[in-house]
Image (cartoon, rainbow, N blue to C red):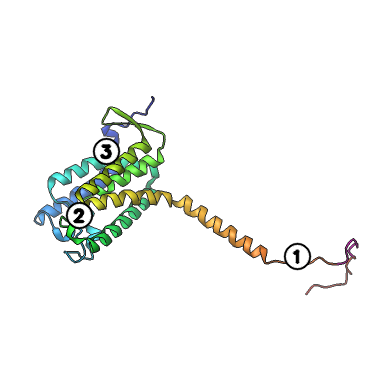
Amino acid sequence: MQYQQGPGFGDLLTPRVLAVVGTLVGLFVLQSAAGGELPMLSLQPVGVGFQPWQPFTYTLSQPDAVSAIVDWVVLIFLLESGWAALGTRTFWLATAATWALSTLAVVGAGAVWPEHGLVPISGTSWWFGAILVFWGVRHRGRVVRLMFAIELRAEVAVLLFGALDLARLLYFRDLASAHLFFAYLAAFSVLLLDEDSWRRWKLRRRRKEIEKQLSRLTVIEGGKSGERPRRSDPSDRVN
């Protein structure tokens, strides 16, 4: 089976990837200078430490240096592929929508399930699954190598990743695992409701409105049947 060889590590270090990862590194340096982990920036359940700014800061916060480095390395391997699959504008819109939907879902879950959210949510792990969905859905049919040995189609690899997220949720039953699965589902939802789908929906709606307006019109035939129409008087004026 033929498959396309992926880019080398140097090809992944594009200026835009370096800009994103460099920003995360800079924020972690500032966090470390401020005393290390800042729980106030991590996302916590409603009623158990939740603050209004946490949905906007938890992605930029890291629990420790090891987690931060792992996140940066994974982003280097994934970011450029997902970015190129969607294009800059769609990529960031899809990322923002995925963040909003998954964050809203996990905050709602934490409000009714606070006892399972003792570990604050932080880092960019939720973004990994979303980027994989972006890439896999846009490259359906392409064959990839999983763990350098197992050949799978891109869409199958994405479904397998989602199954692992679901298994983790069922095993740990905590909000951090739920957040990863919510982000995975949100990424699929975003792609199903992309700009083209939205445009098609608006066109279908507009067509129905036009058909409804046309159905209200009544055609009135003038003159008697079979009678030739009279030539109008040139002196007639239309007011």
- Do we see residue 5 in this rendering? yes
Q: Residue at x 14, y 54 (%)?
A: 31
Q: Is 99 included in the stretch rendered in magenta?
A: no
- Do we see residue 89 in this rendering? no
Distance between the Cα atoms at labels 2 and 3? 23 Å
Measuring from the top left, give residue 146's x and y in whole percent: 29, 32
Segment colored magenta:
223-229
Question: Which image quadrant: the C terminus?
Answer: bottom right
Residue receiving disc 3: 77
Other-residue count near label 1 (Cα within 10 Å), few / some / many at <14 / 14–19 / ≥20: few
Indicate which disc residue 121 carries: 2
Q: Quadrant of residue 232?
A: bottom right
Residue receiving disc 1: 219
Label 3 is placed on what type of residue? Answer: Phe
Q: Determine the main secondary structure of the stretch shown in magenta.
A: loop
The mark that comes first in sequence, 2 or 3, is: 3
